[in-house]
Image (tube, rainbow, N blue to C red):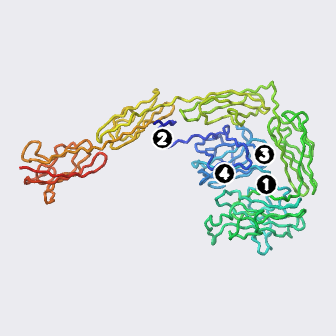
Amino acid sequence: MNKYLCIPIIFFCVFGYSQTPSNDDCVSSINIASVDNYCSDDAEYSNLGGTIDPPFNDICFINYQNAVWFSFVPSEPAIIVRLLSGGAFGTLEDPKMALFTGDCNNLQYISCSPGRARFEDEFTVSGLTIGQRYYLLVESGVGFEGTFKLCINDFIAPPSPESDCPDAVILCDKSPFQVESLTTAGNDATELNGFPGACLTSEFNSSWYKWTCDQPGTLNFILTPNNYVPGFESDDIDFALFELPNGLDDCANKELIRCMASGANGQNGVTDPFPTWEICNGPTGLSPTDGDLSELPGCQPGNNNFASEIVMDAGKSYALVVMNFSTSGLGFSIEFGGTGTFLGPEPDFDLFAIDAFECDKRIEITNSSQSLADPIINYAWNFGVGAEPQVAAGEGPHTIIYESFGTKSIALTVETTMGCIVTKILDVDVAACCMDTSTLDIIASATDVSCFGEGDGSATVNGLMGAPEYNYSLNGGEFVPNSLFNSLDPGTYELTVQDIKGCEVTTTVVIEEPEPILPDAGPDITVNLGYSGNLNAQYSPVNPGDSIFWTPPDGLSCTDCLNPEVVSPGTTTYAFTVIDVNGCSAQDFVTVTTEIIRELYFPNVITPTTQDGNSVFTLGLGRQVELVEELSIYDRWGNQIFICEGISPTDTGVGWDGRFGRCGNTDELVDPGVFVWLARIRFIDDEVITYSGDLTVLK
């Protein structure tokens, strides 16, 4: 049987070989099509074999020694990125991440992660340009490379958390959001005092939110710790919900209506086993199917980390405080549900194509926002990547032109006098505007597969002229900014370049692979124990610079020849390996079966007084014998009368000559009679066997 390998030098067979990841460089980054609640599979990605990247100046503590790259285009202006490893999630240790924009030839640093823990890391970045491509670098501590799980979610970021009720963030709609960290109790840590029997009596690591009900109805929500993974212990997020009797500013008279403090059981600083309180771990909030108004600390019978949803009344105001009891510094995400709504402005706008909805054509945008509670005082427009202008302020109308085609996102953020900030995002499909006179061209090259069957070919493609920036497609697949396609099998590939106007040009490249190395170790053979045979190997093609070797070397006359003589002490399978000048290798195997035949000859009569071949008792030993450890003679009463130890098979004349004593030092002859001999023999396969028999001594 043949096994194909690709190893530059023989030592890789012994110590292992790590292939460079396909996304080792920015130009070959893995494109994540959507980062709306994206999570990879457990241990899906790896930086094993990652190589050095050009460093940026003084950016956090990124080492640039083993990074891999990802790219994505956000559809909302903020993201949270999480990396998980350890256990089922992977093996990577000491993770760090950094975010860039621009292109791979001119990256611009944006932000980096804090390097939070041995097996996890996360960071949040806001103020992103919708529709802009971003590049994510992921690395590990040097020497701690491995696999990992990656999660990214884009969202509309609320204002930064506030830890005091009077300064609380005002929510004006039920858009979900994410908070990166909770680290302070604010200026007033007594805001939870004065509620007898409440589940929470002190404030720590908190954030406050307030809103006023617009349309009456139910309200429920789910709070999820940032480090929550099903089946694993996460941070303990607690909350309290209040009604503000006299409006948003009435924190002094707030009335507690829901309280949630469930968490781990334990005492004296020792936490009970996780499965005993797992139901009170992770997500918490208000549920439409729960009947609790409150749950005290710990995980009491009947607790489930949720309380009952509320029914909001139109015009009433409410306040929510969220706290991280675990004090890890991590934050949470929140999703609202129910039929009731929050009072706030309603940003809206209309689009009118003066010529057509295509690139290089004017689009007029008119504002149609409204606010019933208080006036809108600020309008902030973001027309996305490729727009001219890209941002604008004021009610408008505004006229824009997109220099590039594709799906564009227009975001309008409005702010009212009360502090409500609400964003609306609308996607617009802008058609291509490629002209017949386009100068777009393409250049491409291919790197052949290194060894037969390896699948490590690659293709490099670049756009020329036309209207940069370029995207590329392989065999009609998704267009991505990567100009390098890795891990390709041999074959013919279509490569297409597309510029920002939608013009496309296609070319083909051919990836070839070397012919296979075909080793033949020859037929299996059988040899008798102690005897030799010959292995008969051959291979093709034979070229100058090839090297061959056999493993293991045991019993072989040579390890770098085609036809070694073999003396096998037992059944052995030998590997015959061929390595060509390119480091490609193939193996075949042959089994040498040892036939266990233990040859041993001995006389049963000797006549010591004669001078012929019958005068000495000697053992006739075959090639299988390594040593006669002991030869003893006993009389009929069991008395030892002779012993000889350590007889080599080559000592053909060594034996018993019918005299008392020991080997090499005998005395007088014994009387004629019948004696018993015993021989303990060690064979070349390390088997030790004791033989015995009768021997008659004649006069």
Q: Quadrant of residue 103?
A: top right
Q: Earlier in the sequence, mark 3 or mark 1?
A: 3
The disc label shown at residue 391, or none: none
Residue 150 or 353: which is nearer the viewer?
353
Q: Earlier in the sequence, mark 2 or mark 3?
A: 2
Q: Earlier in the sequence, mark 4 or mark 1?
A: 4
Please tell me how crowded label 1 is: few (under 14), some (14-19), or many (20+) other residues with Cα within 10 Å. Answer: some
Residue underneath mark 2: 13
The disc label shown at residue 75, or none: 3
Q: Amino acid at mark 2?
A: Cys
The disc label shown at residue 176, or none: 1
Q: Earlier in the sequence, mark 2 or mark 1?
A: 2
Q: Amino acid at mark 3?
A: Ser
Q: Amino acid at mark 1?
A: Pro
**Which label sits in the foreground, 3 or 4?**
3
Q: Amino acid at mark 4?
A: Leu
Q: Could you tell me residue 217's position as x and y percent?
A: 85, 61
Q: Quadrant of residue 344?
A: bottom right
Q: CA distance from mark 4 to mark 1?
A: 21 Å
Residue occupying the point 44% across, 30% down:
539
Q: Earlier in the sequence, mark 2 or mark 4?
A: 2
Q: Could you tell me residue 197's position as x and y percent?
A: 76, 74
